[in-house]
Amino acid sequence: MKTLKNLSKVFPFFTIVAILVFSVSWSDIFGQTVFEAPAKKLIDFGWHSPSIQDLQGSLELYENAPFDGLSIKMSQDVGGGNVFMVKDWQNVTTEAKHREIKYFASMKSSPTLTDNFLVLYGASQMDWFSDGDWLQVEDQLRFAAQLAQTAHCRGILWDPEPYKPGKNPWKYVEQENNARYSFDQYYIKVRKRGAQFIETLQNEFPGIIIFSLRELSDWQQGSPFSGSLLPVTQPEQTLKELNDAWWGLHPAFYVGILDAIDINTQFIDGNEEAYYYTSALEYFQIRTTLMDDAQAFIPPELRQKYHGSFRLGHAISAEYIAGNWLGMSPFPYRLTGQATMMTSAEKAKWFEHNAYYALRSSDEYAWLYTEEMNWWNGDKVPEGFKEALLSAKHKVKTGQPLGFEIKEIIQAAQDKADKFYQNK
């Protein structure tokens, strides 16, 4: 039998094949079959989230916290990220814009804070039907996208909640032309604006991530703050409720985003309602709610696109778990008061539980909301909370189980709160 060496003399082709076979790995020939899943990342958002000026010369301070990214706030003299506040935007000077661009251009890269987002808000001064107003919105969006790119942010953190002094752009009965235009007419217009919103951002910033704090997750069966419209069993009744709902026009905006979203753009539902979760099941159940039940808000022709583009994140509320929202309306005291019935160690366990499952069940990102707590200097951070957060992140990263249950802690605390606050 001729050897490969002898064959190569007769057939040089065999020499080439032999070299290729023995110099190229099997994975190169047949393709890699196992890949790394996206790392889970925790983003900060709250009262102490930095402005771009805060980061000047202080980046090391902000690296000293258990976050993978910051939510960075724009300066008030360029509108503060309130992209629907069109009258305020008209007062922004060219000098202020140039100054802001310089601030963002000076942002240094960080090996720790790798996934930063620029914050935009949804409070409004605009009329959905005014093309002139919308041109102002698009101008602000382009400016914001430019800033985010300049600072090497991953994208935009979009908080659509209508904080004062702006008006609510999502509640139909609060729109100035609701006597002139029906809910259906507003739906069509808001859907168009949603498409224009995403087109403007992704055209200015290809590959952008929009991390929305809340979208269709608002309609889950959950806290007293949620719309609780899912699953839809009576479409006509649901439509009536949307007419009066705080977030009634918000689904139209999301559908418009689906109309125009690019394949390279990520849009994340940040599930703000997860603030109030007390079980692992809720974190996994919401995905089924949004993949199945929420299709009632998605036109049939967009459902395949919805399934392909859907990304889920989760919120964690340190304040709620610490008991700092006692008496918050319209919650019953058994919920806002449950943390006040826990020991410091029990609250830290609840916090670790929620951080663990928020990260574990997200597609990539979870976000931590705080108000008075300052994670960078430790002010008002409850005992054990930082350690709990680090523990949760480590367990998720290394594929470990949480290792404990909190069902009995929660039940005992709620029972105590029921009794203690029964006359409230």
Image (tube, grey):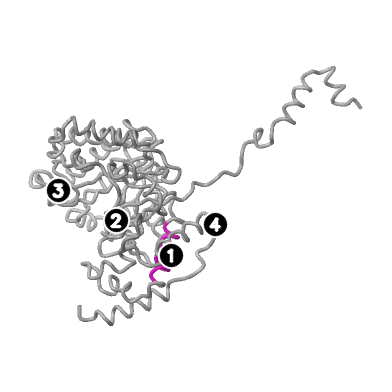
State the residue position of label 4.
399
- Cα distance between the residues tagged 4 and 1: 15 Å
Give the quarter of the image for residue 53.
top left
- Cα distance between the residues tagged 2 and 3: 21 Å
Marking on residue 166: 3
State the residue position of label 2.
218
Q: Position of residue 219 (x, y in %)?
A: 29, 57
Q: Describe the element under mark 1 as helix, strand or loop.
A: helix
Looking at the rendered structure, the kind of residue marked 3 is: Gly
Q: Is residue 143 above or below residue 340?
A: above
- Name the residue at 90% across, 25% down: 2
Q: Write the start and end of the magenta stretch as one range.
A: 347-358
- Name the residue at 65% across, 33% down: 28
- Cα distance between the residues tagged 4 and 3: 44 Å
Marking on residue 353: 1
Locate the C terminus and report the quarter of the image it occupies.
bottom left
Instruction: Give the mark nearer the N terminus: 2 vs 1.
Output: 2
Foreground pick, 310 / 396: 396
Graded by Cα atoms within 10 Å as few (under 14), some (14 to 19) or many (20 or more), the crowding at tag 3 reads some
